[in-house]
Image (cartoon, grey):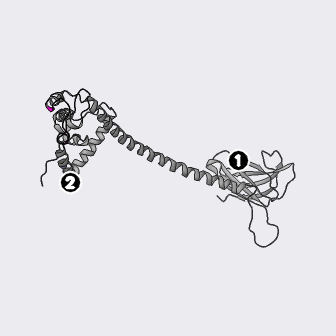
Amino acid sequence: MNVQHISEEDLILYSMQSLSAGETATAELHLENCTECSARLAEIAGDLALLALSVPQQAAPAGARDRFLSRIATEVQAPHLSNSAASSAEMTPAPSPVLQKTEPPTNVETPEVAREVRPKRNWFPILVPWAAAFAMLAVAGYLGSKNQKLEELLNTDKGQIARLSVDSARAQQLIDTLTSPEAKQVTLTEGKGTPPPTGHTSYLADRGALVFVGNNLKPIPANKTYELWIIPANGKPPVPAGLFRPDDKGSASVILPKLPEGVPAKAFGVTVENAEGATSPTLPIVLAGAAGL
Ligand SMILES: [Zn+2]
């Protein structure tokens, strides 16, 4: 079936609901079956929304405005519009055919007189609110779709923030679990007897990041402290990696002490030092562990 597509002008007039009833019916019938014209109509509806936002470079297709205006001018003369839109106080509304039958006109003016006045009517006050309403609808539609896009964007960011919060909360939970005095520290050992002191170190040399957790540590005098050391793999002197004192259960931790970055570890050691700490370890080393290079 070779059908003539709807002209761009007619699509514009259709989207403004300015086609005649017959033309509208024809257009609707065609639009139902023609995806091409439906797509063009959607595009025009979008263009009109932009026009309504007063974007200067978005001009309506040539001729559309003239045809629109001339159509309105034509419809001003049409009787069905004249009857329904009388608004001027100077003018008597033309009686409808029904009124003429049921109710004899009491007015001295004849319908002929009214008809002579009619073409002079100023349509501007009627058209302006109509055009304003259309523009507002178009703007509302445009802003609605913009708003939806912003909302989608916002939701994406909310998702990322939520994920980061979860990561951060998990990290905090890990630190709390390792360091909280309320955390139950239990070392599992074989058989009975006093479990031996132990220390566990996690160390990222590149970042200079270290976490140490000690258990079953022997109590030390108030004027003394334990001190953790990194024994570098490059033969340099031991690097102090934090002071710690065990609690009454013998637990202690060192979390992310200030360390130089990029010191490869051969081993870790713990010494007992005076309360203020030392810059080089005092023997004996009470706990030691090789890094297993
Ligand atoms: Zn078509």
The answer to whether mark 1 and mark 2 are in CB contact below 8 A is no
Tag of residue 133: none
Q: Secondary structure at mark 2?
A: helix
Q: CA distance from mark 1 to mark 2?
A: 73 Å
Q: Quadrant of the N terminus?
A: bottom left
Above-or-below relation of 39 to 77: below
Q: Picture coordinates of residue 74 (x, y %)? A: 16, 34
Look at 29% across and 39% down and name the residue there.
Answer: 47
Residue hosting label 2: 33
Is residue 288 found left or right of 75 in the rendered image? right
Establish if 18 lies above or below 125.
Answer: below
Decide: few, some or many residues near mark 1? Use Cα within 10 Å; few <14, some 14-19, many ≥20.
Answer: some
Residue 195 to residue 150: above or below: below
Dot 2 alpha-carbon crowd within 10 angstroms: few under 14, some 14 to 19, many 20 or more: few
**Camera-side residue: 291 or 53?**
53
Task: Judge whether residue 120 is colored magenta.
Answer: no
Q: Earlier in the sequence, mark 1 or mark 2?
A: 2
Furthest residue toward left: 2
Of circles 1 and 2, which is in front?
A: 2
- Report the magenta stretch's main SS: loop
Extent of the magenta region: 101-111
Numbered disc total: 2
Give me the residue at 44% from left, 43% from top. 150
x, y percent for residue 130: 29, 35
* Occupied quadrant, residue 287: bottom right
Q: Which residue is mark 1?
A: 257
The answer as to whether callout 2 falls within 8 Å of ligand 1 is: yes
Q: Residue at x 61, y 49 (%)?
A: 206
Q: Nearer the viewer, residue 224 or 20?
A: 20
Secondary structure beneath label 1: loop
Q: What kind of residue is marked 2?
A: Asn
Q: Position of residue 30 (x, y in %)?
A: 19, 50
